Amino acid sequence: MALFTSTGSAILRPDEVGPLIVQPVQAAAVATQVAQTVTTRSHEFRVPIVAADPTAGWVAEGGEIALSDADLDEVTITPAKVAGLTVITRELAEDSDPAAARVVGDGLSRDIARRLDEAFFGALAAPAPAGLESMAGVTEQTYATPVADLDAFAAAIAAGEQEGVSVSSFVTDPATALTLSQLKEGNASARPLLGQDPTRPSSRVILGVPLYVSTAVTAGTVWAIPRTRVMVVMRNNATLETSREAYFSSDQIAIRATMRVGFAFPHPAAIVKITEAVG
């Protein structure tokens, strides 16, 4: 596959952008693994919300049925641009081996995935989309330190059920994940308290719920996420372009990958933030 070197030209056909950039980002980013991933061609993406159902009641035969209205609302998401940039030699750009393009795409997609997770689990300033740390109205739970049991996680699952959802994943930082992984079933036992998925030997499970790890999560924080109430909205106009203008004198070529991504949290109370108890 030849890589074109004319200014601003696409080095991949539109139908090739998905496998090289979009899919690797979705696979590498934790956010796209724990949330629904929705693609849109529009500048804005609207998520309709039924905040409260219309009410029913017992009525005598022949009696009037009381009118009630559903409480309707919506969340509007405008995907923001996330971009990665790298420079390669012209010789590499002209390599006909598909692996050359794959290496470049992998590097860009990993960087975009890191930025995506930083925004999703954090509270970055604009133009980054608003993430979990900036959300008001999430349910909060605490755990005591040193951690000795999984009571806080059971409480988080129950809090989700109270909101009518099931927690589908826990996400935490690497240090907290290690602490949880070292918990034992008892003082005299060497068996870990966390379970494992037999189909994924390296995975960890808390009370039947998968535990994911991301360096983008604030240290000491664990997020309990119901997949049905969290969305990653992606514009499907991912682009991969090349230009030699800026690096003309060194015979190098700049390769730029861009995507537009936003997040939707239409039911904040269904998301549980578990943090260390103070005092």
Image: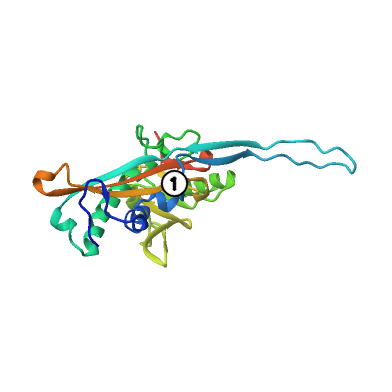
Q: Which is more toward the observer, 148 or 171? A: 171
Residue at (18%, 61%) from the top-left corner? 95
Asked whether the viewer can see residue 149, the reply is no
Q: Is residue 240 left or right of residue 164?
A: left
Residue 219 position by quadrant = top left
Query: Picture coordinates of residue 57 (x, y %)?
Result: 78, 41
Please identify the quadrant where the N terminus is shown.
bottom left
Asked whether the viewer can see residue 176, the reply is yes
Disc 1 packing (10 Å; few <14; some 14–19; many ≥20): many
Question: Is 265 rendered above or below residue 150?
Answer: above
Residue at (56%, 37%) from the top-left corner? 74
Please identify the quadrant where the C terminus is shown.
top left
Residue type beneath disc 1: Val
Query: Picture coordinates of residue 275 (x, y %)?
Result: 41, 40
Query: Picture coordinates of residue 180 (x, y %)?
Result: 37, 52
**Residue at the spot of label 1:** 232
